[in-house]
Image: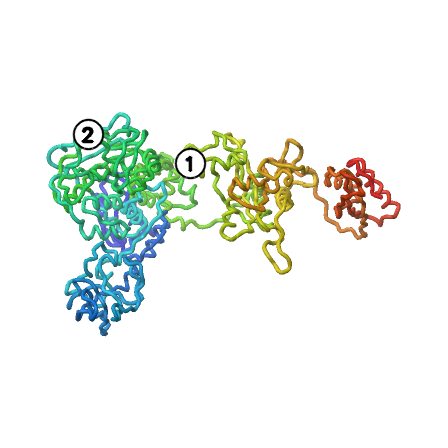
Amino acid sequence: TPLIKVIMLKKHCGRQHNVGQGSGFGHELLMHDEEQIISTQAFKNFVRIRCNNCWIGILDQHRPHRSTTTLEQITDALTMIGLEVEDVDDKSALQPFVIAKVLSAEKHPDADKLRVLSVDTGTGDPVQVVCGAPNAATGLIGTFAAPGTYVPGLDVTLSVGKIRGVESFGMMCSERELEMSDEHDGIISLPDDAPVGTPFADYAGLNDPVIEIGITPNRPDALGVSGIARDLAAYGIGEVKTPAVQSITGEGACPVDVTIAPDATDFCPAFGLRLVRGVKNGPSPAWMQKRLMAIGLRPINALVDITNYMTFDRGRPLHVFDAAKVQGNLEVRGANDGDDILGLDGKTYAMKEGQFGIYDERGLESIAGIMGGEESGCDETTTDVLIESALWDPLTMARTGRDLGIITDARYRFERGVDPAFMVPGLDMATQLVMDICGGAPTLITVAGEVPQPEFVIDFPISEVKRLTSIDIPFVEMKGILTLLGFWVAGMPSPDNDHTVKVAVPSWRPDVFGKADIVEEIMRIHGVNRIAPQPLPATGTVGQPVLTPGQIRTRNARRALASRGLVEAVTWSFIPQADAEHFGGGADALQLENPISTDMSDMRPSLLPNLMRGAQRNADRGMADSAMFEVSHVFKGETPEDQLRCAAGIRRATAGDRGAGRHWAGNGSAVTVYDAKADAISVLEACGLDTSKVQIVAGGPDWYHPGRSGTIQLGPKVQLAHFGELHPRTLEAMDANGPMVGFEVWLDALPAPKRKATRTKPVYTQSVYQPVRRDFAFVMDSDVEAAKLLRAAAGADKKLISEVSIFDIYEGERLGEGRKSVAIEVTMAPSDRTLTDEEIEAVAAKIVQSVEKTTGGELRG
């Protein structure tokens, strides 16, 4: 039965209310005047008791406490409260290792340094093992791994093998082979009372699962185990066991003074320092090493391990200096160009203006908040240690770490924000750990600057929970959740204050600054999964489109290109400067000030460069026939109007829309300009454009082949698309080879759709009358476009003529130089009668007259 805990007490009636602890809901209520009790209400998760003018809410951590919880329940709870579990190491890999006893140890017949062991693994049948450890002897109790066991320290799976002619059926393991430490001088030696046959992980306490959590940038409080424990306890999993930090007075002033230079006051609001004399630095305790190794950290020495432990346990990064290696006082100030430091990772880093460091009289000792220097680091000879606890500006930390290419656990936390109120207590806690593990006598703390005292109070209407989540949650439960999360709630909701209370945000939650954030905190603990799905209320009106015309065009373009066999690609918006200049970009305004790499220096003026490089990468890896497209933005300038939505695609080798590659029935042909043209036309049609009204003219931008490219336009000033083969110079500049064709459709250039349809599309009817087809051949100048001929023939009688197509083109000496013959087929489809010969001849005459007038051609005799 859960333990009842008092969460809310409100004294309105002037009488003292004392609520004791008890089992379940059978608690004991002691009041100054018990006759004032009016009613008691029992709810699922709490009890509410009313006297004359007040309510007393008694809540057990929002929901009954679970005394035992499975690993699956914990991981589910973490994900539900917003701490997404990325991986779980349940230590099942260590279960095959068992405690075994060496029954005998005989010298190997062919090797002086090897022994043949007879090992009791608890099964009753001794196992023969060949071992080279110097401490392998009769009676030793150690850890045995049978064949088929994966040994993490060696990254191998054991099998039965022969060593110098003697079979070995497993191995006796050292600490390094089980990744317990770097010790490899001998196999593990256990006490005589170690139970043979028992899994070693259970005996040694190595079976504690490790949960890896992906922390979002807005939750710096969850970068320490204590913060995660707080959330779990609020959800009802376990109880918070985080002990309070006891203040350490110390004796005497710290002999090393700290100053913050005027140029660093914004970067470093406060800096705390304390000296501990007479420490003995050696290995950290086994319990600390075990916890650090469980999360992938290598124990170094006690002083360094303590700082790492504080980082992950309380989310409070610290740094320790060897006091004997620090000359004079410390100063936090801006770095000068050329200041360099040998970091603790063995690399030399050159600082520059705008970055900050911690200096002594000798020079730079530490990259502030990111990494300490090797010259002032602690080792086994350290006897006096300076412990630093400071606050750093998150944005400057992120920029400095990125510029120097340093990623440390300290930087990761400082750039997200640490709890300012824990700066001095964190220093006290680290001091206590140093005293407990290494001994020593501390001095007083010296603090430069002023520790910020964030006081942020939100006026919170409790009705916001119902408005934003649709769930009715009793106020006592809201207050219980917020209290367990560290918030302070003052006031009682009543009609007089519009049911508003005041909520003070704890110093470790910089992400909470509004009413919606408070609702989110309540709901993630209450349980988002408890929000019942509800249908949207009927409005009685016709629903309006949700997507904008631009969004509709984007989706239609993607669907059309995918249906033509192109594969969608998503590429970076940044390209190398040379590529940008080749495709009409490269302006200074479009160059990034701080690019991710030199290959991502400019905003892309076209989608084609990335698609071309992608298609070539496929070809280099054996996929020669590539067809890819992308629908995204390109950048022609620095204003919002210069950000254009574009649909572009690339076809390479034989990747046409009718199949690619070699086939017994006929190999695929190489892609041509007409493949790119068809792709561009399909996008325009999918976006609702009547492509019979567009003009197609020869030529395009410089990156297309001048004689094998075209432009689709509504006039000289309204260009809708470009298509064609890529210019050989373009292929060479992009390190690509052909054949390769591409297209670009400017979706923003398409005419805006009409807000209301002016005409209703007529009902489709199939004519019952036979269509009539007639062939015509016209002789005209070679430079006359065939499209002009088709439009002229189709416009001769729009009511009767349903289709016009070209079926033959001839150029020869009989026609004369600069002349060509174009043959067309015209289909006439009557809808109300059968055409007579006279009517057909009349339409034919109109066709001839229209073509001769438009193209200057004449009917071929």
Q: Residue at x 24, y 60 (%)?
A: 201
Crowdedness near tag 1: few (<14), some (14–19) or many (≥20) residues, C-alpha within 10 Å: few
* Circle 1: element type: loop
Q: Amino acid at mark 1?
A: Pro
Q: Residue furthest top?
A: 262
Picture quarter with the C terminus = top right
Crowdedness near tag 2: few (<14), some (14–19) or many (≥20) residues, C-alpha within 10 Å: few
Compared to 85, does 123 lie above or below?
below
Residues at marks 2 and 1, CA–CA distance in whole angstroms: 36 Å
* Mark 1, residue position: 595
Q: Please name whichever residue, 655 or 79, is drawn nearer the observer in this view of the structure.
A: 655
Query: Residue 365: image x %, image y %?
Result: 23, 35
Query: Residue 546: image x %, image y %?
Result: 55, 41
Question: Total number of numbered labels?
Answer: 2
Q: Please name whichever residue, 683 or 419, is drawn nearer the observer in this view of the structure.
A: 683
Q: Amino acid at mark 2?
A: Glu
Q: Residue furthest front?
A: 813
Query: Residue 725: image x %, image y %?
Result: 60, 42
* Mark 2, residue position: 361
Q: Is residue 282 left or right of residue 638?
A: left
Q: Is residue 832 left or right of residue 502?
A: right
Q: Please name whichever residue, 340 or 592, is drawn nearer the observer in this view of the structure.
A: 340
The first of marks 2 and 1 along the sequence is 2
